[in-house]
Image (cartoon, helix red, strand yellow):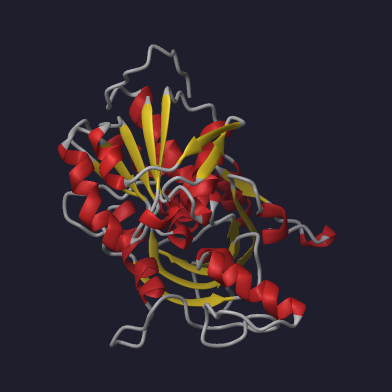
Amino acid sequence: MKVAVVGATGMVGRVMIKVLEERKFPISELLPVASKKSIGKKVIYNNQPYEVISMEDAIKQRPDIAIFSAGGSTSLEFAPKFADVGTTVIDNSSAWRMHEGVKLVVPEINANELTTEDKIIANPNCSTIQLVMVLKPLHDKYGIKRCVVSTYQSITGTGVKAVEQLRNELAGEKGEMAYPYPIHKNAIPHCDVFEENGYTKEELKLTREPQKILSDKSIALTATAVRIPVVGGHSESVNLEFNSDFDLNEVRAILSKTEGVKVQDNPDVNTYPMPIYAQGKDDVFVGRIRRDHSQPNTLNCWIVSDNLRKGAATNAVQIAEYLLKNNLIKNTSTVSYEV
């Protein structure tokens, strides 16, 4: 496959290239794409340097797949141009997620909805992905009535500028600020920009995207998103009200059998998910599973995942793998590939 990675020099883009390499995706030609200021720079794939090219040059080469992680405005402008030359676009920005007719995909949940006609496919928000990975099997069994989620999100979700801010603060140096306040020794209840209703865009993504992925608008969701000085991944405190009662052992068994989910839930020996252990891994980790005694049919749990991997890069590559395995995309390579 001829594969373009758009935003190849960014934090997520570099992880995408790493995941493509780790998962041995059959690439005959890699096209790293970035902004004009990055053209000519090198990225490393399979120990080989590849020169970054422009968007226009990449489109001319008509790649089979283009994986985007370059911001919403870039995706809105260029994803259709790639699609027009036959490229299947997997977009990691928020630009296309809620567009009617554009699939919002977590492969373990709804990849079966994809067809050859889907030339632009949306990758969900990182916090949404880890949330729905746990919600889906429980919703199938008990029916989710309401979900209250509070996030504790890694600075890597903001990007390189935020990582540099924390490094500068740890070193006692002044530098460019990604946030309106210091992040070291702090928690900032402000992810993305505020809307008129008082919620941030990040919080609204968490209320809208799960409904689309799970194909159920009856689920009531509300969210508070907080940025914390952590690098390894996002954490979520989740309160789930079901339509029917549940057994805790059955809940753990259901989640343990769910592809891509790992249960870490033994408080007797202090076993629970933490971003320090999730970093660099592709699974979604869930623990602190317990009944909410304040009202019936309600469960509390704690969900952690590496936001750069399953929350972004890995999920996008898994979509590409599904397309290839199910003959939903032209494959110009003669490589035999099994997922």
Relative image position of residue 275 (x, y in whole percent)? 67, 60
Count of all numbered marks drawn on residues in the image: 0
Q: Residue at x 48, y 81 (%)?
A: 190
Query: Which residue is at a point 56% across and 64% down the rendered structure image?
Result: 156
Q: Quadrant of residue 222?
A: bottom left
Q: Residue furthest right?
A: 269
Left or right of 60 on screen, residue 337? right
Viewer-proximal residue among 151 and 252: 151
Comparing 162 with 280, the one in front is 162
In this view, 194 is above or below 201: below
Q: Residue shown at 49%/46% (left/top)?
A: 41
Q: Position of residue 209 (x, y in %)?
A: 33, 61
Q: Residue at x 44, y 13 (%)?
A: 336
Q: Looking at the image, which is closer to me, 296 or 72?
A: 72
Give the quarter of the image for residue 218. Answer: bottom left
Can residue 1 be seen in the rendering of this structure? yes
| For residue 212, above or below residue 227 | above
Where residue 278 sits: x, y (%)? 66, 53
| Residue 201 in the image, given as x and y percentages of width and height | 36, 74
Residue 258 in view in this figure: no
Residue closer to the observer: 105 or 337: 337
For this orientation, the residue located farthest to the front is 40
Query: What quarter of the picture does the N terminus occupy?
Result: top left
Q: Is residue 128 above or below residue 40?
A: below
Image quadrant of residue 90?
top left
